Image: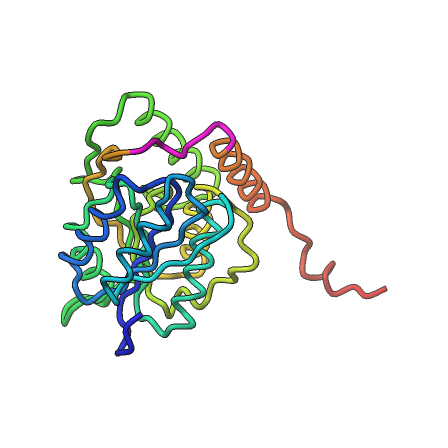
Amino acid sequence: MRDRARDVLVLLPTFEERATLPATIAGVRSHAPGADILVIDDGSPDGTGRLAEEIAAADPAVSVLHRPGKQGLGTAYALGFARALAGGYRYVVEMDSDGSHLPAELPVLLAAARGDARNRGAGLVIGARWVPGGRIVNWPWYRRWVSRTGTRVARIALRSELRDLTSGFRVIDAGWLARLELDALDSHGYAFQVETAWTFERLGCPIVEVPITFVERAGGRSKMSLGIVAEALANVLRWGWRLRRPRPHSSEREITP
Protein backbone atom coordinates (compact mmCIF):
# COMPACT_ATOMS: atom_id res chain seq x y z
CA MET A 1 0.00 0.00 0.00
CA ARG A 2 1.10 3.56 -0.63
CA ASP A 3 3.38 5.19 1.92
CA ARG A 4 1.33 8.30 2.65
CA ALA A 5 -1.22 9.66 5.09
CA ARG A 6 -3.72 6.83 5.07
CA ASP A 7 -7.38 7.77 5.01
CA VAL A 8 -9.64 5.09 3.51
CA LEU A 9 -9.16 1.35 3.11
CA VAL A 10 -11.73 -0.55 1.04
CA LEU A 11 -11.98 -4.25 1.91
CA LEU A 12 -13.03 -6.61 -0.89
CA PRO A 13 -13.39 -10.25 0.23
CA THR A 14 -13.43 -12.56 -2.78
CA PHE A 15 -14.22 -16.14 -3.64
CA GLU A 16 -14.62 -16.87 -7.35
CA GLU A 17 -15.18 -13.24 -8.36
CA ARG A 18 -12.89 -13.17 -11.39
CA ALA A 19 -15.70 -11.94 -13.67
CA THR A 20 -16.61 -8.92 -11.54
CA LEU A 21 -13.53 -7.92 -9.53
CA PRO A 22 -11.83 -5.76 -12.21
CA ALA A 23 -14.92 -3.59 -12.69
CA THR A 24 -15.40 -3.24 -8.93
CA ILE A 25 -11.81 -2.14 -8.39
CA ALA A 26 -11.98 0.25 -11.35
CA GLY A 27 -15.20 1.72 -9.96
CA VAL A 28 -13.69 2.29 -6.52
CA ARG A 29 -10.57 3.87 -8.03
CA SER A 30 -12.79 6.18 -10.10
CA HIS A 31 -15.21 7.27 -7.37
CA ALA A 32 -12.82 7.19 -4.40
CA PRO A 33 -9.44 7.82 -6.02
CA GLY A 34 -7.68 8.48 -2.72
CA ALA A 35 -8.65 5.13 -1.20
CA ASP A 36 -6.50 2.05 -0.88
CA ILE A 37 -8.01 -1.35 -1.69
CA LEU A 38 -7.31 -4.66 0.04
CA VAL A 39 -8.52 -7.80 -1.75
CA ILE A 40 -8.86 -10.79 0.60
CA ASP A 41 -9.10 -13.91 -1.52
CA ASP A 42 -10.01 -17.31 -0.12
CA GLY A 43 -8.07 -19.47 -2.55
CA SER A 44 -10.54 -18.94 -5.41
CA PRO A 45 -10.25 -21.88 -7.83
CA ASP A 46 -11.25 -19.62 -10.75
CA GLY A 47 -8.04 -17.59 -10.47
CA THR A 48 -9.48 -14.50 -8.76
CA GLY A 49 -6.42 -14.25 -6.53
CA ARG A 50 -4.02 -14.33 -9.49
CA LEU A 51 -6.04 -11.68 -11.29
CA ALA A 52 -6.01 -9.51 -8.17
CA GLU A 53 -2.22 -9.81 -8.04
CA GLU A 54 -2.00 -8.65 -11.67
CA ILE A 55 -4.13 -5.62 -10.88
CA ALA A 56 -2.07 -4.86 -7.77
CA ALA A 57 1.17 -5.09 -9.75
CA ALA A 58 -0.07 -2.25 -11.95
CA ASP A 59 -1.67 -0.15 -9.20
CA PRO A 60 0.11 0.61 -5.91
CA ALA A 61 -3.23 1.45 -4.27
CA VAL A 62 -4.27 -2.21 -4.51
CA SER A 63 -2.90 -5.05 -2.38
CA VAL A 64 -3.91 -8.68 -1.93
CA LEU A 65 -4.10 -11.12 0.95
CA HIS A 66 -4.36 -14.81 0.11
CA ARG A 67 -5.98 -17.37 2.40
CA PRO A 68 -5.67 -21.11 1.73
CA GLY A 69 -9.38 -21.82 1.39
CA LYS A 70 -12.91 -20.61 1.93
CA GLN A 71 -13.05 -19.47 5.56
CA GLY A 72 -16.10 -17.23 5.59
CA LEU A 73 -16.97 -13.59 5.08
CA GLY A 74 -16.77 -12.73 8.76
CA THR A 75 -13.21 -13.97 9.23
CA ALA A 76 -12.14 -12.16 6.06
CA TYR A 77 -13.49 -8.87 7.36
CA ALA A 78 -12.01 -9.44 10.80
CA LEU A 79 -8.61 -9.92 9.16
CA GLY A 80 -9.14 -6.80 7.07
CA PHE A 81 -10.17 -4.79 10.14
CA ALA A 82 -6.97 -5.79 11.92
CA ARG A 83 -4.89 -4.77 8.90
CA ALA A 84 -6.70 -1.43 8.66
CA LEU A 85 -6.11 -0.62 12.32
CA ALA A 86 -2.46 -1.66 12.12
CA GLY A 87 -2.06 0.50 9.00
CA GLY A 88 -3.48 3.59 10.68
CA TYR A 89 -6.44 4.13 8.35
CA ARG A 90 -9.16 6.59 9.35
CA TYR A 91 -12.09 4.88 7.63
CA VAL A 92 -12.70 1.26 6.66
CA VAL A 93 -15.15 0.27 3.92
CA GLU A 94 -16.95 -3.05 3.63
CA MET A 95 -18.07 -3.74 0.08
CA ASP A 96 -19.02 -6.68 -2.12
CA SER A 97 -16.85 -7.37 -5.15
CA ASP A 98 -19.61 -8.91 -7.26
CA GLY A 99 -21.14 -5.67 -8.58
CA SER A 100 -24.02 -5.59 -6.09
CA HIS A 101 -22.73 -2.46 -4.38
CA LEU A 102 -22.34 0.52 -6.68
CA PRO A 103 -18.97 2.32 -6.34
CA ALA A 104 -20.72 5.52 -7.45
CA GLU A 105 -22.52 5.54 -4.08
CA LEU A 106 -19.33 5.20 -2.05
CA PRO A 107 -18.68 9.00 -1.87
CA VAL A 108 -22.11 9.50 -0.25
CA LEU A 109 -21.36 6.94 2.45
CA LEU A 110 -17.92 8.42 3.06
CA ALA A 111 -19.40 11.91 3.34
CA ALA A 112 -21.80 10.68 6.02
CA ALA A 113 -18.85 9.24 7.95
CA ARG A 114 -16.77 12.40 7.66
CA GLY A 115 -19.57 14.82 8.54
CA ASP A 116 -19.35 18.55 7.93
CA ALA A 117 -19.62 21.88 9.73
CA ARG A 118 -23.28 21.19 10.56
CA ASN A 119 -23.29 17.44 11.17
CA ARG A 120 -20.90 15.31 13.12
CA GLY A 121 -19.70 12.27 11.22
CA ALA A 122 -21.14 8.84 12.02
CA GLY A 123 -19.10 6.05 13.54
CA LEU A 124 -20.90 3.54 11.32
CA VAL A 125 -22.57 4.29 8.00
CA ILE A 126 -24.77 1.53 6.57
CA GLY A 127 -25.78 1.52 2.92
CA ALA A 128 -29.38 0.51 3.51
CA ARG A 129 -31.91 -1.10 1.20
CA TRP A 130 -34.92 -1.13 3.53
CA VAL A 131 -35.16 2.63 4.16
CA PRO A 132 -36.99 5.32 2.16
CA GLY A 133 -35.02 5.83 -1.04
CA GLY A 134 -33.39 2.41 -0.90
CA ARG A 135 -33.86 0.12 -3.91
CA ILE A 136 -33.17 -3.44 -5.00
CA VAL A 137 -32.72 -4.24 -8.68
CA ASN A 138 -33.23 -7.66 -10.30
CA TRP A 139 -33.88 -9.65 -7.14
CA PRO A 140 -36.60 -12.33 -7.35
CA TRP A 141 -39.42 -12.11 -4.83
CA TYR A 142 -38.09 -14.92 -2.65
CA ARG A 143 -34.71 -13.20 -2.18
CA ARG A 144 -36.52 -10.04 -1.11
CA TRP A 145 -38.69 -12.07 1.25
CA VAL A 146 -35.72 -13.85 2.84
CA SER A 147 -33.80 -10.59 3.30
CA ARG A 148 -36.73 -8.61 4.70
CA THR A 149 -37.85 -11.44 6.96
CA GLY A 150 -34.32 -11.98 8.26
CA THR A 151 -33.99 -8.28 8.98
CA ARG A 152 -37.32 -8.18 10.84
CA VAL A 153 -36.41 -11.22 12.93
CA ALA A 154 -33.03 -9.71 13.82
CA ARG A 155 -34.54 -6.34 14.74
CA ILE A 156 -37.12 -7.95 17.03
CA ALA A 157 -34.76 -10.49 18.59
CA LEU A 158 -32.02 -7.95 19.23
CA ARG A 159 -34.26 -4.98 20.04
CA SER A 160 -32.44 -3.02 17.37
CA GLU A 161 -33.52 0.29 15.86
CA LEU A 162 -31.55 -0.32 12.67
CA ARG A 163 -33.51 -0.91 9.47
CA ASP A 164 -30.93 -2.93 7.50
CA LEU A 165 -28.79 -4.96 9.87
CA THR A 166 -27.69 -7.36 7.15
CA SER A 167 -26.39 -4.85 4.61
CA GLY A 168 -22.76 -5.41 3.65
CA PHE A 169 -22.03 -1.93 2.22
CA ARG A 170 -20.59 0.08 5.11
CA VAL A 171 -18.11 2.70 6.21
CA ILE A 172 -16.67 2.38 9.72
CA ASP A 173 -14.72 5.03 11.61
CA ALA A 174 -11.50 3.38 12.81
CA GLY A 175 -11.90 4.98 16.22
CA TRP A 176 -15.07 2.96 16.74
CA LEU A 177 -13.68 -0.08 14.98
CA ALA A 178 -10.88 -0.19 17.55
CA ARG A 179 -13.52 -0.69 20.24
CA LEU A 180 -14.65 -3.99 18.77
CA GLU A 181 -13.25 -7.12 20.37
CA LEU A 182 -12.50 -8.87 17.10
CA ASP A 183 -11.51 -12.11 18.81
CA ALA A 184 -14.89 -12.21 20.58
CA LEU A 185 -16.91 -12.12 17.34
CA ASP A 186 -18.18 -15.61 16.57
CA SER A 187 -19.95 -15.33 13.20
CA HIS A 188 -18.22 -16.69 10.12
CA GLY A 189 -20.84 -16.02 7.46
CA TYR A 190 -23.26 -13.19 6.75
CA ALA A 191 -24.37 -13.14 10.40
CA PHE A 192 -21.14 -11.19 10.91
CA GLN A 193 -22.88 -8.12 9.49
CA VAL A 194 -25.69 -8.41 12.02
CA GLU A 195 -23.29 -9.05 14.89
CA THR A 196 -21.04 -6.09 14.19
CA ALA A 197 -23.86 -3.61 13.53
CA TRP A 198 -25.67 -4.69 16.69
CA THR A 199 -22.44 -4.49 18.70
CA PHE A 200 -21.80 -0.95 17.50
CA GLU A 201 -25.38 -0.04 18.36
CA ARG A 202 -24.99 -1.37 21.91
CA LEU A 203 -21.71 0.52 22.30
CA GLY A 204 -23.54 3.77 21.62
CA CYS A 205 -21.88 4.34 18.26
CA PRO A 206 -23.55 7.06 16.15
CA ILE A 207 -25.04 5.17 13.20
CA VAL A 208 -26.50 6.54 9.97
CA GLU A 209 -28.35 4.47 7.38
CA VAL A 210 -27.97 5.92 3.88
CA PRO A 211 -30.29 4.64 1.13
CA ILE A 212 -28.54 2.73 -1.64
CA THR A 213 -29.45 0.84 -4.78
CA PHE A 214 -28.55 -2.82 -4.44
CA VAL A 215 -28.12 -4.63 -7.76
CA GLU A 216 -28.19 -8.39 -8.24
CA ARG A 217 -24.63 -9.60 -8.87
CA ALA A 218 -23.25 -8.86 -12.32
CA GLY A 219 -21.56 -12.25 -12.67
CA GLY A 220 -20.66 -15.48 -10.91
CA ARG A 221 -22.97 -17.16 -8.45
CA SER A 222 -24.30 -16.24 -5.03
CA LYS A 223 -22.43 -17.62 -2.01
CA MET A 224 -25.62 -17.70 0.05
CA SER A 225 -26.51 -21.20 1.21
CA LEU A 226 -28.87 -22.91 3.60
CA GLY A 227 -25.99 -23.37 6.03
CA ILE A 228 -25.20 -19.66 6.03
CA VAL A 229 -28.86 -18.78 6.60
CA ALA A 230 -29.07 -21.34 9.42
CA GLU A 231 -25.97 -19.93 11.11
CA ALA A 232 -27.36 -16.41 10.94
CA LEU A 233 -30.74 -17.44 12.37
CA ALA A 234 -29.20 -19.54 15.15
CA ASN A 235 -26.83 -16.75 16.17
CA VAL A 236 -29.53 -14.08 16.15
CA LEU A 237 -31.83 -16.21 18.32
CA ARG A 238 -28.98 -17.04 20.68
CA TRP A 239 -28.02 -13.38 21.08
CA GLY A 240 -31.65 -12.45 21.59
CA TRP A 241 -32.03 -15.11 24.29
CA ARG A 242 -28.94 -13.81 26.09
CA LEU A 243 -30.36 -10.30 25.88
CA ARG A 244 -33.55 -11.41 27.61
CA ARG A 245 -32.02 -13.85 30.07
CA PRO A 246 -32.63 -12.79 33.67
CA ARG A 247 -29.49 -11.51 35.32
CA PRO A 248 -28.58 -11.94 38.98
CA HIS A 249 -29.43 -8.99 41.20
CA SER A 250 -26.51 -6.91 42.33
CA SER A 251 -26.89 -8.27 45.87
CA GLU A 252 -26.51 -11.83 44.55
CA ARG A 253 -23.39 -10.90 42.63
CA GLU A 254 -21.82 -9.45 45.75
CA ILE A 255 -22.14 -12.68 47.74
CA THR A 256 -18.79 -14.43 48.12
CA PRO A 257 -18.27 -18.10 48.99
In the image, the segment drawn in magenta is 220-227
The answer to if 181 sits in the magenta stretch is: no
* Residue at (21% x, 60% y) in the render: 110
How is colour applied across the structure in the image?
A: rainbow
User: Residue 95 placed where, x, y %?
Assistant: 30, 50
Q: Is residue 147 left or right of residue 26?
A: right
Q: Is residue 188 left or right of residue 33?
A: right
In the image, residue 153 sits, relative to residue 86, either above or below, namely above
* Residue at (36% x, 74% y) in the render: 88
Q: Nearer the viewer, residue 175 or 99?
A: 99
Q: Nearer the viewer, residue 223 or 143?
A: 223
Q: How many marks?
A: 0
* Residue at (44% x, 61% y) in the render: 203
Quadrant of res 255: bottom right
The answer to if 224 sits in the magenta stretch is: yes
Q: Is residue 241 left or right of residue 121?
A: right
Pick the quarter of the image with the C terminus.
bottom right
Main secondary structure found in the magenta portion: loop
Pick the quarter of the image with the N terminus.
bottom left
